[in-house]
Image (tube, helix red, strand yellow):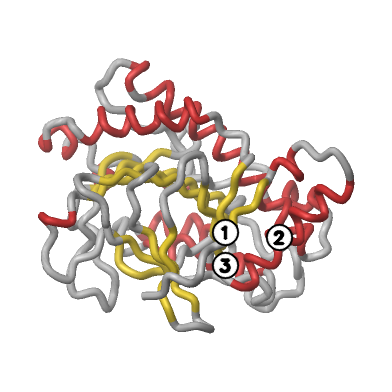
């Protein structure tokens, strides 16, 4: 383990609320360089209020403290839109000896009608007072969804593209959000990770870590070492997924990462994944021979985990 490398912390306020053109250019260059070197970076000045982050922690605590049987009634495997609860031990990647120790709860765009076999549709909400979960969680979702779109714009500008290009593949973007609880390390099995080493499949990930609850590690290929990413107050972790690496012609990296709960007690985090339209293809290279859509990439990565039907696979292929 190396303690000599740290992910850069970038102040996004120079891009979001610039006082000069140089402010914007500085942030674009910092994001571009970090995405090339690490595939990860941290951000301040992101615009998500600390009070809303605290409300999210409280809301996740309310959810995950529900009785196990109540949580299992909301299983995402029984939901046509793959929203709801994932119990600990349900996620096992190829090559991992043991399943992840985490438990999760998923939401996404809240559409009234189920479309494309559940890729669009309504969320599943727990039976809690709205002020104890749904309202703060939805406000948080909306703000981090907007932040994800802005990060995409910055990444595009780092490749010499206009920020407006994001509108061409984001008319109705796929933006899932995963709330995560890691149990204390003391009760996990020997060799079991909170989340095993993996890359994210798609676009931009906006990760909130409960302050003071460390656990995230990022693999740096050049140094062949894991970089520990501390959980800092009002600091988000941003990373690029496999789709960004491919769309950018490998100019941006998609790095492996894992979670080992190093804190005493449980650990909470929340990831918002901003991908793009389900039928979007590479906007940077319309002649890309690999013309897989966002939806097709989703199916390829998650068809086994989500028990996708042949109908849903066919609909995404035809979207």
Q: Where is residue 288 in the image (x, y as percent from the top left)?
A: 71, 75
Q: Is mark 1 on a helix, strand or loop?
A: strand
Q: Are the residues tagged 1 and 2 within 8 Å (C-beta)?
A: yes
224 or 36: nearer the viewer:
224
Instruction: State which mark lies toward you, 2 or 3.
Output: 2
Give the mark count: 3
Sequence-wise first label, 2 or 3: 2
The residue lying at 64 percent from left, 52 percent from top is 10
Which residue bears the numbered disc 1?
41
Which residue bears the numbered disc 3?
39
Q: Where is residue 136 in the image (x, y as percent from the top left)?
A: 43, 24
Q: Quadrant of residue 8?
A: bottom right
The residue lying at 74 percent from left, 53 percent from top is 27
Q: What element carries label 2?
A: helix
Q: Distance between the residues labelled 1 and 2?
A: 9 Å
Count neighbours of disc 3 (C-alpha within 10 A) and say few if under 14, some if 14 to 19, many if 20 or more: many
Sequence-wise first label, 1 or 2: 2
Q: Quadrant of residue 82?
A: top left
């Amino acid at each position: 383990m190396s303690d000599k490398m740290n992910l850069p912390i970038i102040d996004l306020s120079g891009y979001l609320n610039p006082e000069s053109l140089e402010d914007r250019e500085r942030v674009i260059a910092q994001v571009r360089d970090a995405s090339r070197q690490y595939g990860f970076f941290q951000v301040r000045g992101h615009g998500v209020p600390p009070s809303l982050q605290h409300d999210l922690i409280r809301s996740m605590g309310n959810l995950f403290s529900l009785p196990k049987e109540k949580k299992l009634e909301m299983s995402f495997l029984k939901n046509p839109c793959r929203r709801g609860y994932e119990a600990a031990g349900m996620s096992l990647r190829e090559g991992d000896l043991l399943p992840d120790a985490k438990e999760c709860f998923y939401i996404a765009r809240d559409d009234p009608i189920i479309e494309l076999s559940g890729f669009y549709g309504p969320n599943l909400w727990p039976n809690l007072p709205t002020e104890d979960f749904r309202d703060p969680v939805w406000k948080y979702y909306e703000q981090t969804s907007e932040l994800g779109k802005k990060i995409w714009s910055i990444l595009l500008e780092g490749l010499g593209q206009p920020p407006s290009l994001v509108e061409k593949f984001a008319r109705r973007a796929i933006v899932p959000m995963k709330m995560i609880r890691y149990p204390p390390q003391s009760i996990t099995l020997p060799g079991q990770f909170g989340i095993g080493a993996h890359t994210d499949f798609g676009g931009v990930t906006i990760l909130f870590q409960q302050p003071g609850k460390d656990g995230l590690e990022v693999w740096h290929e050049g140094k062949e070492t894991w970089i520990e990413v501390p959980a800092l107050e009002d600091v988000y972790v941003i990373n690029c997924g496999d789709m960004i690496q491919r769309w950018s012609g490998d100019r941006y990296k998609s790095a492996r990462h894992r979670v080992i709960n190093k804190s005493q007690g449980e650990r909470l985090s929340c990831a918002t994944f901003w991908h793009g339209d389900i039928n979007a293809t590479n906007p940077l290279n319309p002649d890309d021979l690999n013309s897989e859509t966002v939806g097709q990439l989703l199916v390829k990565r998650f068809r086994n985990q989500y028990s996708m039907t042949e109908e849903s696979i066919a609909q995404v292929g035809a979207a």
